[in-house]
Image (cartoon, rainbow, N blue to C red):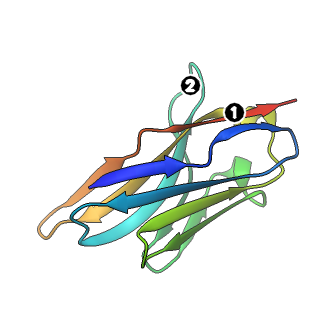
Amino acid sequence: VQLVESGGGLVQAGGSLRLSCAASGSIFSILVMGWYRQAPEKERELVADIGSGRSTNYAESVKGRFIISRDNAKNTVYLQMNSLKPEDTAVYYCNIIHFEGAITRSYWGQGTQVTVSS
């Protein structure tokens, strides 16, 4: 299973960006799709995730500003980021929890840089 992310970039504070992550390969069943981020000298943290039934979970810091969604037909997860702040600057990583019969396995994308200027 491979994950390819797109949509990062440089934006001014208050602006918007939309991240996409497409999964490909031997896809059986994706249980959870999510976005994490890691700022310099900080630990990687969950931004938002979405289950197969479309239940969502958000970090407190992004609630009301970010929206996660998924297209199961395309095995793709999106993160719409609005009202961006300089503290949202980080490398954003896509993650999926993939059901592979007897086990589940976690996969990560390569990361995409998001930079918010003040």
Q: Name which residue lies at 48% across and 56% down.
A: 21
Q: Earlier in the sequence, mark 2 or mark 1?
A: 2
Q: Residue at x 88, y 45 (%)?
A: 14
Q: Which residue is mark 1?
A: 89
- Residue 32 lies, with reference to residue 7, above or below; the image says below
Quick check: 18 above or below 88? below
Rendering coords of residue 46 (x, y %):
53, 47
At x 63%, y 42%, the residue is 8
CA distance separating discs 2 and 1? 12 Å
Q: Nearer the viewer, residue 72 or 24?
A: 24
Q: Amino acid at mark 2?
A: Lys
Residue 66: horizontal and vertical position, in percent?
71, 57
Farthest left residue in view: 102
Graded by Cα atoms within 10 Å as few (under 14), some (14 to 19) or many (20 or more), the crowding at tag 1 reads many
- Whole-percent x and y of residue 9? 68, 38
The residue nearer to you, when weighing 114 against 44, is: 114
The tag on residue 42 is: 2
In the picture, the quarter occupied by the C terminus is top right
Q: Quadrant of residue 91?
A: top right
The reply, left or right, for residue 32 in relation to residue 35 is left
Residue at image point 42% right, 79% down: 73
Query: Does residue 49 lie above or below 15 as drawn?
Result: below
**In the rendered view, does 91 fall on the left or right side of 24?**
right
